[in-house]
Amino acid sequence: MFEVTMLPASEGDSLLIRYGDPTAPRRVLIDAGRKATFKQLLEFLPEEERHLELFVISHVDRDHIEGALEALDPGRSDLTFDDIWFNAYRHLLWQPDSEEFGAVQGEKLTKLIVDRKLPWNEAFEGGPVRLEGDLPVVRTLAGGLKITLLSPDAAKLARLEPQWAEECRRAGLDPAASATAEQPQPEDYGPNDDIEDFGGSLEDLAAETTVEDTAPPNGSSIAFLAEYDGRTVFFGADAHPSMLVASLDQLGRELPLRCDLIKIPHHGSQANTTRELLERLDGERFMISTNGSYFGHPDEIAIARILTRPSDGRKTLYFNYDQDRTRPWRESEAQRNRYRFDCVYPSAEGEPVTVTL
């Protein structure tokens, strides 16, 4: 078996891979969304399925990492781990002999990992999860899942170092910050208005010029390919598209790369879902994780780029929320037939979406 479940994670990500023997599958968790996401994860996982072969915490953004604090807290979680991939402060300007954890480094997540003596970046001998120079890195898990790292490289990690303390505060990881500190309120972006009733040209929309994401936390994202039993999944995290493009170009494999599932980076942001990236990926199934709050994702330009990308088959967009920014894409049958796509939403509010490969 090989399946990917997209949990409801508010505006963030929480993805569960299950693969191997269906009677005893192995599990890999990628991020844990917001705090409430962890409760939904436990509801989804029976007690006998709470051992994770790998827990990937892609980067220090609240919508990816807040639930990880719950997952690593022994008072709230019974999850166990073979390895945890997470780049903390010590990994940003890596010095292998350094064992110190200063004040700025002692954010909550690092403290939980260190205090509990949890396995941490063991596949990288305790060092940073990053490329070797500009070359993708391959690690194969004990169960046979092959992971090819596409992001970050050393430069992307180093760019985060001057902002580490502030980004930890913003992500809720600073132990000195109040847990009840005022947070920005979600904005009501409403439905996609750029194409009223989708009567406009998706080709024109897809061709619009947009600025690439340059945020250092997103650039530090752990993004990768996961391959098992002849099937390939692309997990883009919030990574910068130029980094992903450069890594895909370095794979030494035929491009566009055939993927059985593509997890679109940064919740369908137009700043990360570029035409250059999509030109290097060939597939019909696309996952987009967001409830649309705070940032109004997914961007209609990003969806237009996906739908106008040439493909031999009919595309499927998998959304983990039926919301104002995702709902319009299913409403015009003529548009769906013209661009040959379907939409999948949760069977009920708060339910996960699973894709079997």
Image: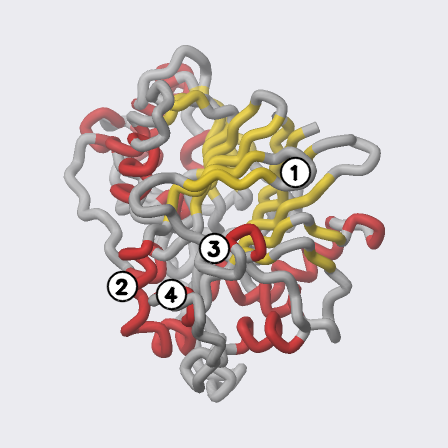
Residue type of the residue flagged with mark 4: Trp
What label sits on residue 181 in the rendered view?
none
Q: Nearer the viewer, residue 131 or 170?
A: 131
Residue type of the residue flagged with mark 3: Ser
Q: Position of residue 164 (x, y in %)?
A: 35, 73
Residue at the extreme top:
312
To which residue does mark 3 refer?
A: 58
To which residue does mark 2 refer?
A: 159
Label 3: few (<14), some (14–19) or many (≥20) C-alpha neighbours in 10 Å: many
Residue at the extreme left:
209
Residue type of the residue flagged with mark 1: Ser
| Picture residue at 41% right of the left edge, 78% below the top | 169
Q: Nearer the viewer, residue 328 or 343?
A: 343
The answer to which of marks 1 and 3 sits earlier in the sequence is 3
Q: Position of residue 266 (x, y in %)?
A: 39, 48
The answer to which of marks 3 and 2 sits earlier in the sequence is 3
Q: Nearer the viewer, residue 37 or 4?
A: 4
Say how the picture is coloured.
secondary structure
For the residues labelled 3 and 4, say whether their Cβ atoms are less than 8 Å apart.
no
Quarter containing the N terminus:
top right
What number of labels is visible?
4
What label sits on residue 94 in the rendered view?
4
For marks 2 and 4, give the one nearer the viewer: 4
Q: Position of residue 150 (x, y in %)?
A: 39, 41
Q: CA distance from mark 4 to mark 1?
A: 45 Å
To which residue does mark 1 refer?
A: 347
Q: Position of residue 282 (x, y in %)?
A: 39, 22
Q: Nearer the viewer, residue 181 or 222?
A: 222
